[in-house]
Image (tube, grey):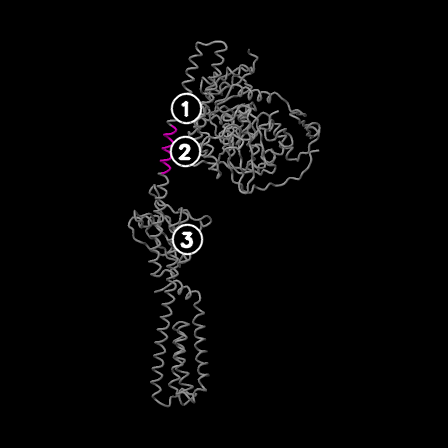
Amino acid sequence: MEHPESLLRAVSHGWRTPFTGYAVATLGVGLLTALSQPLRQWVEPTNLVMLYLLLVVGVALRYSRGPAAWSAVLGVLAFDYFHVPPRLSFAVGDVQYLLTFAVMLLVGLVLAEMMARLRQRAEEAAAGERSTSRQYALARELAGAIDMSQVQRLLAAFMHEEVGGLAEVWWVNSREGLHRLAPVAGEDEQTVLPGQGETLIPALLETVLREGGPHEQDDLMRSTHRLLLLPLDAPMRRRGVLAVSAPVVRLGRAQRSQLGAVALLVAIALERLHYVKVAQQATLDMERERLRSTILSALSHDIRTPLTIMVGQADALLDADGEHARTLVLALREQTMRMSELVNNLLDMARLQSSQVALRRDWQSLEEIVGAAIAHLGERLARHTLEVVLPEDLPLVEFDAVLIERVLCNLLENAAKFSPEDGLIRIVAELQTHAVRIAVENSGVNLPGNAERFFEPFVRGDDVATVPGLGLGLSICKIIVEAHGGVLSAGNRSEGGAWFAFTLPRTPPPQLETEESVTNE
Amino acid sequence: MNELPLALVLEDEPQIRRLLCDALQSVPLRCVEAGSMAQARDRLAEACPQLVLLDLGLPDGDGKRFIGELRAWTQLPVLVLSARSQERDKIEALDAGADDYLIKPFSKGELLARVRALLRRGGRDEQPLVRFGEVEIDFARRRVSRLGQTLHLTPIEYRLLCAMVAGQGKVLTHRQLLREVWGPAFSDSAHYLRIYVGHLRHKLEIDPARPRHFITETGTGYRFVI
């Protein structure tokens, strides 16, 4: 059984291990021989053989079989030369020593082999344990992955560590095409497949996808690498192909079977993510369906009522004249403007709901947007006292100006609708550590019940049914604020009246190139 | 009646053309009507209008193309009336050369105010002295004063002020102002504009949070009104 760890060492440290091992073996034999000289008076030479064998065991435990065998041979020679009479000569006085030599050499070599094998097993077991625990870690992380790119990132890191190779996932998307999982940003050049022959690779992928067996061949881009294509078989269906390019020397049988297991993990992760997406889409669709029916029922009321009034007023106009006609015309105009506002709200709502809200974020001045919102409402705020409180050091904040102006307009309009004439409306901005909070407060009555429910479409306070306007404004505000990463909240003022506030996240504004302060004189 | 100045109304909906012409009578302006760009080109060959009002959605194409054609030969004021409320449409029309933009539905008062502002623009020569609110600008001496006190403006603030005053009544897009004051390299750095318009408001407006002269056209640009 080969293993990356031992192989890696063999490859990268090939020159060092034998050299050190042989040196240590030689030194050991020399040292042992020197130390055993004084023992000669008391110890039979044959018993000294045991010491040499012990040395072989030691060398075998520490180094590979080569140095151990070397120490066995060297031991026999040293024993012959220094201990067997006649001493300091390779000549052998007594023939029985030849048997000693033979046995000593044989035992030494066998010991060397056994010890080396033992050590290798232990190393392999340790390495196997490490790679198993890495695989467990991968399984755990894949189970927690929340998007496809994360799967790709985890896989790439694992492959790099485990076989020193590149890996990528080709998955079958909803339109039944094979697509490469988006690689991590900045790693584009590290792809496995491009350049492998433009037509060859898609065909290979298709084959693996269709037939379900693994495929292996030389990597056409890297001569020392092999290219492996493994089908990603998830419980429900085949989800794609895992492509791995790794150095030949690191692809043992164990690695190949491990890659099979990893392919299964990735397949399961992809399938899980796929179903998560399906489930989210289903929830979204239900949510949308619910909203649609709410809108339809509210629309039939909120649009038909003003239309009925308008038809009635137009009919009445036919017979009216003088002051009465003028009153009717003004009322008709008012109704029309209201309808127009309603249509605007509905269009906005449709736009905001139809897809992800596309924000046109830019660095904006809150002072400017507050001013624009007030100017936009114009006459509708004329009857109220307006107070704007902005901190002196208000920085630029990044947001979509048009949408946030919309939020401010809606909040100001609500404030104007639900506070008494000559009431006070305050716009207060406040700098927080990570956000800017903008509140619109008004005097008057408190909000009835739970304020949060006003943010749902078509909900209005029960006792305000006489105030015109579809309950769309606040839900539009909520969608806009949340798309910005902020929070819309509401509450009552202790002195009576309500407040509505939203936050916008603060990030460091861009640096301006400074201009020397010069007067124009 | 023949001495009345002319307005070309390019709009494919006859009812709205009718309404516009009725409203414009009180300016007073006479109307030349066109329902398509092709018709409008014919009318332009016959008459010489002082003002063009147009819708963007026309049967024979996008009104922005017509603005581009006009701008190739005349600086005649152009007011866009459109039901498209997306900022991108506005900016494109303004960058194509339109002077102002009204979103349908609009009130008669709003329409007439915009039309009058545009006509005033056309009839005026460059003046060396401009007064608004508490402020007086003496272009000849490069001096800005408020309530008789000379104000200190930085060179950029002054250039921005000049650009805005020169385009008074018109909507000036962010891009137009940035290119003119900072140079083409800055045409995407709208935050400079926000900061410097803020400076001008704090120095020249009575209530900078509710400006009366340096008006924000949210998402589009600015308008300077006297």
Residue type at mark 1 is Asp
Q: Which residues are magenta?
A: A283-295
Q: Residue at point 48% right, 38% down?
A: A487
Q: Secondary structure under badge 1?
A: helix
Q: Secondary structure under badge 3?
A: helix
Mark 1 and 2 residues: CB-CB less than 8 Å, in contact?
Answer: no
Q: Quadrant of the C terminus of chain A?
A: top right
Q: Quadrant of the N terminus of chain A?
A: bottom left
Q: Are marks 2 and 3 on the same chain?
A: yes
What residue is shown with label 1?
A302
Specify the farthest residue to the front. A495
What residue is shown with label 2?
A354
Q: Is residue A168 covered in magenta? A: no
* Residue B185 in view, yes or no: no
Q: Main secondary structure of the magenta part?
A: helix
Parent chain of label 3: A
Q: Position of residue A335 (x, y in %)?
A: 46, 20
Parent chain of label 1: A
Disc 1 from disc 2: Cα separation: 22 Å
**Number of numbered callouts drawn:** 3
User: On the rendered structure, is B148 left or right of B27?
Assistant: right
Q: Are marks 1 and 2 on the same chain?
A: yes
Quarter assignment of residue A15: bottom left
Q: Secondary structure under badge 2?
A: helix
What residue is shown with label 3?
A156
Q: Residues within 10 Å of mark 3 (few under 14, many from 20)?
A: many
- Foreground tag (1 vs 3): 1
